Image (tube, helix red, strand yellow):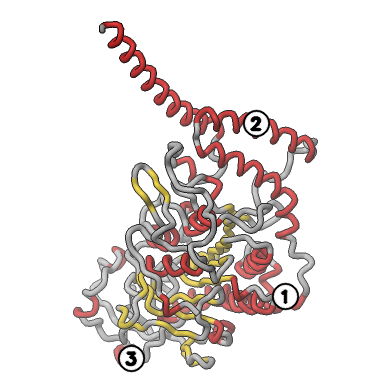
Amino acid sequence: MEDLKKVLTQLNRRDFLTKAGMGFGSIALTSILGTGMSGAKQNMPAPPEAGLDEILKGPHFPAKAKRIIYLFQSGGPSQLETFDYKPALAKWHGQEIPDSIKGTQRNSGMVTGQSTFPLVKSIYDFKQYGQSGAWVSEILPYTAQMVDELCIVKSVYTDAINHEPAVMFVQTGSQQSGRPSMGSWLSYGLGSDNENLPHFMVLISKGGGDQPLSTAAWANGFLPSHHQGVHFRAGKDPVLYLRNPYGVHKEDRRRALNHIKELNEHQHTLWGDPEIQSKINQYEMAYKMQTSVPEAVDTTKEPDYIYEMYGQEARIPGTFAANCILARRMAERDVKFIQLYHMGWDQHGNLPSGIKRQAKDVDQASAALVKDLKQRGLLEDTLVVWGGEFGRTSFSQGKLTKDNYGRDHHPGCFTMWMAGGGVKPGLVYGETDEFSYNVARDPVHVHDFQATLLHLFGLDHEKLIFKHQGRRYRLTDVHGKVIKDLIA
């Protein structure tokens, strides 16, 4: 009997040490390999039983969109100066916002010292355009000419009131960093139609202001790290460390990668850490990108009429217009998720001049992108999205003068537009109250927007799930409904 107890005790100890050793080994191996991409280091390696199938056998139902170009306007564009025309503000201009209205929404800490909150009409004129009769500001003349291609949603609202939590919320479904972005979810769920380029790529352009943008917005979170967005930079080397060192030939690199792959596969068999498989995928993708990326980002053969369509800034690498041309080229190559960020929309003061400059940066190129995709037969299954993280207040932040004012953050309502990819063209959806302070009709929460986006790709947002640390996660958390009125 004593011998049996001793054997059982030894087995229990051995079992414990084996499991503990596997855990310590995974952590050590991850440390040795490194993550290879920013943001992934914060994620502990997932245990073998985590997650679901990497790529679904297919969409849950027929998809309308194959790829997305998301034109994210970072900083929160004012809906009152762009798409949400409020003539009633003209009669209220300069008067204090009623407490019964102001109290319905939170205000940021930047107006806590402000004693008066005068309502302010937009300094810019609006007109109706197209058969849809959509109201568009004079600062967006190119967008105004294509409103019948757009599905304009004026009743989006969010939970977050400050920039980073609000950006995280729109991009990842959570106000806290660490969750996978939409691009990562699509990469995880559907894979890619082009195995020589990343599933998910990111391009950044800068307008005015100094509001930062966190790389967590395109991170993989707890998903395997090869689903993270790849940041393409302007200039000679769009992806860092992609070129072989001097004296290293392509054949040498291939042989080295083959040996590294054998070692990694052995380690994966031994430890069962899915992050090792991500490393294999990343090394292989980097090798393929050495030839595919230079060709994909080479715009020198684009004809002059393309630059005239997108605007002369399209000839300057790193501008929003240049990034729009790159986005179209990536869409032609079936990159699944193409994310553009244009920074600088945070106009707490000097809004009239600031927003006019920002609009000039993006207006012509955004309209040209939709037009260009359509003429190439790509718009039908390419979803284009334009919008920021929240809106702006209808009262003035800071002093209101004859020709100057500012606007604070406002989560209660803002405007986004979509085009192509299965949405209804020529639709203006939703409505705000006369102050553009609250949604008055057809509200679209950020989680509803995310659920609808996944639906367009043939994915049920309640079924695209990843198990992490004992909990099943999804992009929309436990919320969201598909807004079927937006779908063609």
Label placed on residue 157: none
In this rendering, position of residue 337 left or right of residue 165: right
Q: What is the x, y in percent for residue 227?
A: 54, 50
Q: Is residue 88 above or below residue 443?
A: below
Residue type pointed to by label 1 = Ile
In this rendering, position of residue 377 left or right of residue 40: right
Q: Check the image and name the residue furthest to the front.
A: 1
Evaluate if marks 3 and 1 touch, with contact meaning CB atoms under 8 Å apart. no
Front residue of this view, candidates 295 and 104 = 295
Name the secondary structure under disc 1.
helix
- How crowded is the residue under tag 1: few (<14 C-alpha within 10 Å), some, or many (20+)? some
On the image, which quarter does residue 320 sit in? Answer: bottom right
Residue located beneath label 1 in the image: 306
Residue located beneath label 3 in the image: 88
Name the secondary structure under disc 2.
helix
> What residue is shown at x 38% (from left), y 69% (from top)?
448
Q: What is the x, y in percent for residue 228?
A: 53, 50
Residue located beneath label 2 in the image: 262
Q: What is the x, y in percent for residue 325?
A: 67, 68
> What residue is shown at x 31% (from left), y 84% (from top)?
433
Evaluate if marks 3 and 2 touch, with contact meaning CB atoms under 8 Å apart. no
